[in-house]
Image (cartoon, grey):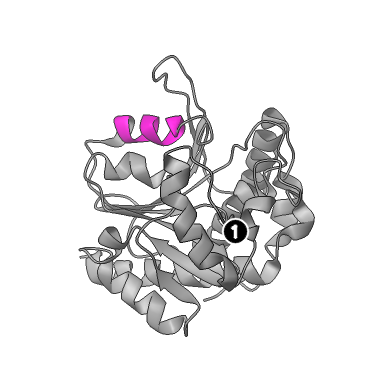
Amino acid sequence: MADAAPILPFVQRLAVPDPATRRGALLAILRELGVPVLRYCDEIAGRTPENIVVRLGQGAPRLVLAAHYDSAPGSSGANDNAAGVAILLSLLREYRQHPPALPCDIVFFDLEEAGGWGSRAYVERFATEHILAMLNLDVCGFGDTILLGPRHSCEEWPLQAAVDTAVQRGAGRVRVVRHLPLGDDASFAAVGIPSLSVTIAPEADVEPLLEAVPLMRQLRPAARMPAVAETIHNGPRDSVDVVEEAAMQAVRACVRGMVAVLSQAYSG
């Protein structure tokens, strides 16, 4: 059962520079959805991220669907990453009544921009649980081509079947790429949990983005910066006005489809 309700109103409520205001808006939306919320403030390396978790279903294995809700200092965080958060809220609007067969944690991470501390704290807390896989939504509001990566995760169990289905249904608008900018998926990969990131960008951005990623990791300038870079981190188009309903709906459909495949295959 798909939920065609608009996603953009969530972004409009979440896209504010002040961290406390953004967190308050997220918690208010979750209260309106009527779902039980868990808040974890675990200290890690002198930092105390506040992760917000909604648990659907009991038992294991569990699937983690995640998006960071913090933003770069001063940024509205509209595309990075209110759009990703809003897509998860849209899925939660459906899943609260029709949950996946596979138990899920829907997680909103704090302090991703500061170094992924929220996801690191989550992994430390839940490392003993059987986490089947993690899907990370990051920069999901601008463009027409969905990118899934890193490639090695997409081509391995248990994610391969779900990714293959997404690519087949995407009719050329879903691509598996060798790497994406580092995100919260890296915290899971570091402890051996299969994980991938989901992002979306204009088709013309794909090659410049792939060229830029290794240079960005070395703190070196790229010869060609993708246009999507202007929509994040206080760039000239870092605004809620750039976030596209169609882009978010496309990502939502892609993620929803992958969850369905994983649920069918691994829900016992």
**26 to 243, vertically: above or below:** above
* Label 1 crowd (10 A; few <14 / some 14-19 / many >=20): many
Q: Farthest residue in the top direction? A: 46
Quadrant (top left/top right/bottom left/bottom right) for the C terminus? bottom left
Find out whether residue 149 is within the magenta segment. Answer: no
> Which element type, helix, strand or loop, lies under badge 1?
loop
Instruction: Give how far across and how far down residue 237 sits, in percent.
Output: 75, 52
* Residue 106 shows in this picture: no
Judging depth in this view, the residue of 215 and 113 nearest the camera is 215
The residue that mark 1 highlights is 226
Instruction: Give how far across and how far down residue 22 sits, in percent.
Output: 69, 37
**23 to 8, vertically: above or below:** above
Instruction: Give how far across and how far down residue 172 sits, in percent.
Output: 47, 82
Q: Main secondary structure of the magenta part?
A: helix
Q: Residue at x 25, y 47 (%)?
A: 193
Q: Farthest residue in the right direction? A: 241
* Residue 189 shows in this picture: yes
Side (left or right) of 15 relative to 261: right
Q: Residue at x 25, y 67 (%)?
A: 155
Residue 248, quarter of the rendered image: bottom right
Judging depth in this view, the residue of 16 and 54 nearest the camera is 16
Identify the magenta region: 116-124
Judging depth in this view, the residue of 225 and 173 nearest the camera is 225
**123 to 262, vertically: above or below:** above
Q: Residue at x 42, y 39 (%)?
A: 218
Q: Farthest residue in the front direction? A: 223
Instruction: Give how far across and how far down residue 107 sits, in percent.
Output: 47, 44
How many marks the image carries: the answer is: 1
Q: Residue at x 73, y 48 (%)?
A: 238
Find out whether residue 119 is within the magenta segment. Answer: yes
Side (left or right) of 135 relative to 155: right
Give, as a three-letter code, the residue at label 1.
Pro
